Image: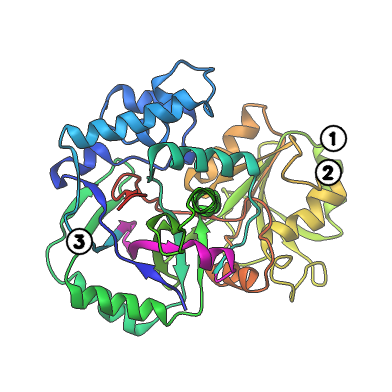
């Protein structure tokens, strides 16, 4: 089962949503976020990334920073830019980008189910990042950044979504990245019960983006349970903010690679070394792969396609068969000695949203010697990895479009 819970969300006034809602805290550097809030003091970044109110170099993990986020959330509410719903509900959040739409359910998910593995993961988490988000939640008394999860498509859920969105949305605005954001507030008891029952029939849901936020939700629940002698497991702090989308609508973009050095190899020597595992063909234009085990490569001002030779890649193991893992096993590790992508500072990762021109730029400006465009991992591959209790190769999934933070907030005390 997949337990979901309606709640009394804190959300922006519809006319203020475009001003208040912000990109997620982890897609912007502190300096990029400071530049955004400079022109918009009501940006939710001041809640979700409160170091923007401090000088560069401030300790982003300090109590003062977390307290400022709490103050900024309280100000948005006291100024009337955000308000708390008067009764529990659910929310349907639709993102439309490049002609495609995806509709997700904004709800609360169970920390107990997360701990039991019914909410499945595909990434390792870093303790320092989990602690940061847990301290942020604990200080604010609120979960302000939603987890982005996936469920396996069900026609019955489609029908419930369609019925609930068969009216004008309560929110409807576009952001500078050409994403249309629509949201419907669902407070009808029958509609809520239908959604709760339908999701309750799912065997599992899968975290797509937000592993640190979900782990932080679980950590806060553990902390609060330890402080509560009357803990029952049903308290509001035992649930975390989640937006759950169908696997049929979710889109993954490539996560490309950029390597700073060839380790002393010339371009010709490098091409010779990879030829035993790849078929190499020079291209007249930037090359974006259109099938698995093909890669684009930009080297010394030229584009190439490189295709894995038969027998050089895994076909059964869910994690090792993903193209990012195949590239590491066949090229990055044996030719360039880059084996641990999490710690090796010779490699950078470029979200597919930035396009192939970014890969050219890195090489042409001299900061990197070779870049690679990848075929994106599929949602089916992600689910298979999670079902096998494996971990995706580092930096394998770039989800687009991004949820806005601040559309719905969950206060830990209902």
The image shows residue 18 at horizontal and vertical percentages of 22, 41
Which comes sooner in the sequence, label 3 or label 2?
3
Q: CA distance from mark 1 to mark 2?
A: 7 Å
Left or right: residue 108 versus residue 356 is left
Residue 241 seen by the camera:
yes
Q: Residue furthest front?
A: 229
In magenta, the rendered stretch is: 95-118
Answer above or below: position of 409 versus 63.
below
- CA distance separating discs 3 and 1: 56 Å
Q: Residue at x 38, y 61 (%)?
A: 108
Kindly check if marks 1 and 2 are in contact, taking CB atoms under 8 A apart as contact: yes
Q: Nearer the viewer, residue 225 or 136?
A: 225
| Residue under pointer 1 | 263
Can see residue 163? Answer: no
Q: Earlier in the sequence, mark 3 or mark 1?
A: 3
- Left/right placement of residue 105 relative to residue 171 reads right
Q: Mark 2 highlights which residue?
A: 336
- The residue under label 3 is 185
On screen, residue 259 versus residue 203, left or right, reads right
Image disc number at residue 173: none
**Residue 163 shown in magenta:** no
- Mark 2 crowdedness (10 Å alpha carbons): few <14, some 14-19, many ≥20: some
Mark nearest the camera among 3 and 2 is 3
First-in-chain label (1 vs 2) = 1
Q: Nearer the viewer, residue 222 or 256?
A: 222
Task: Check disc 1 and report its element: helix, strand or loop.
Answer: loop
Where is residue 338? Give x, y as percent.
Answer: 80, 44
Residue 63, percent from left and from top: 48, 27
């Amino acid at each position: 089962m997949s337990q979901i819970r309606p709640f009394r969300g804190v959300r922006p006034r519809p006319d203020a949503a475009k001003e208040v809602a912000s990109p997620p805290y982890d897609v912007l550097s502190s300096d990029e976020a400071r530049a955004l809030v400079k022109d918009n003091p009501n940006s939710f970044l001041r809640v979700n990334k409160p170091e923007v109110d401090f000088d560069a170099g401030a300790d982003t993990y300090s109590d003062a920073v977390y307290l400022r986020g709490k103050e900024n959330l309280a100000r948005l509410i006291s100024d009337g830019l955000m308000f708390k719903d008067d009764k529990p509900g659910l929310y349907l959040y639709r993102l439309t980008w490049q002609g495609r739409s995806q509709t997700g359910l904004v709800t609360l998910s169970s920390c107990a189910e997360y701990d039991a593995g019914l909410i499945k993961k595909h990434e390792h988490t870093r303790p320092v990042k989990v602690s940061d988000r847990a301290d942020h939640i604990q200080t604010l008394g609120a979960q302000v950044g939603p987890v982005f999860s996936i469920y396996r498509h069900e026609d019955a859920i489609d029908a419930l979504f369609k019925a609930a969105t068969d009216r004008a949305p309560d929110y409807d605005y576009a952001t500078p990245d050409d994403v249309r954001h629509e949201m419907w507030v669902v407070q009808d008891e029958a509609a809520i019960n239908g959604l709760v029952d339908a999701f309750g029939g799912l065997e599992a849901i899968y975290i797509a983006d937000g592993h640190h936020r979900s782990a932080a939700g679980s950590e806060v629940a553990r902390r609060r349970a330890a402080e509560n002698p009357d803990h029952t497991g049903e308290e509001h702090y035992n649930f975390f903010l989640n937006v759950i989308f169908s696997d049929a609508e979710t889109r993954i973009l490539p996560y490309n690679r950029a390597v700073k050095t060839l380790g002393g190899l010339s371009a010709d020597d490098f091409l010779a070394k990879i030829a035993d595992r790849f078929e190499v063909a020079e291209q007249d234009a930037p090359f974006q792969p259109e099938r698995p085990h093909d890669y684009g490569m930009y080297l010394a001002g030229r584009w190439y396609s490189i295709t894995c030779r038969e027998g050089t890649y895994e076909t059964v193991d869910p994690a090792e068969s993903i193209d990012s893992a195949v590239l590491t096993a066949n090229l990055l590790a044996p030719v360039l000695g880059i084996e641990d992508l999490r710690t090796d500072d010779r490699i950078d990762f470029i979200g597919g949203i930035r396009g192939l021109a970014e890969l050219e730029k890195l090489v042409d400006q001299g900061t990197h010697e070779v870049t690679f465009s990848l075929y994106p991992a599929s949602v089916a591959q992600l689910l298979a990895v999670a079902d096998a209790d494996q971990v995706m190769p580092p930096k394998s999934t770039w989800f687009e479009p991004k949820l806005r933070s601040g559309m719905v907030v969950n206060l830990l005390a209902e």
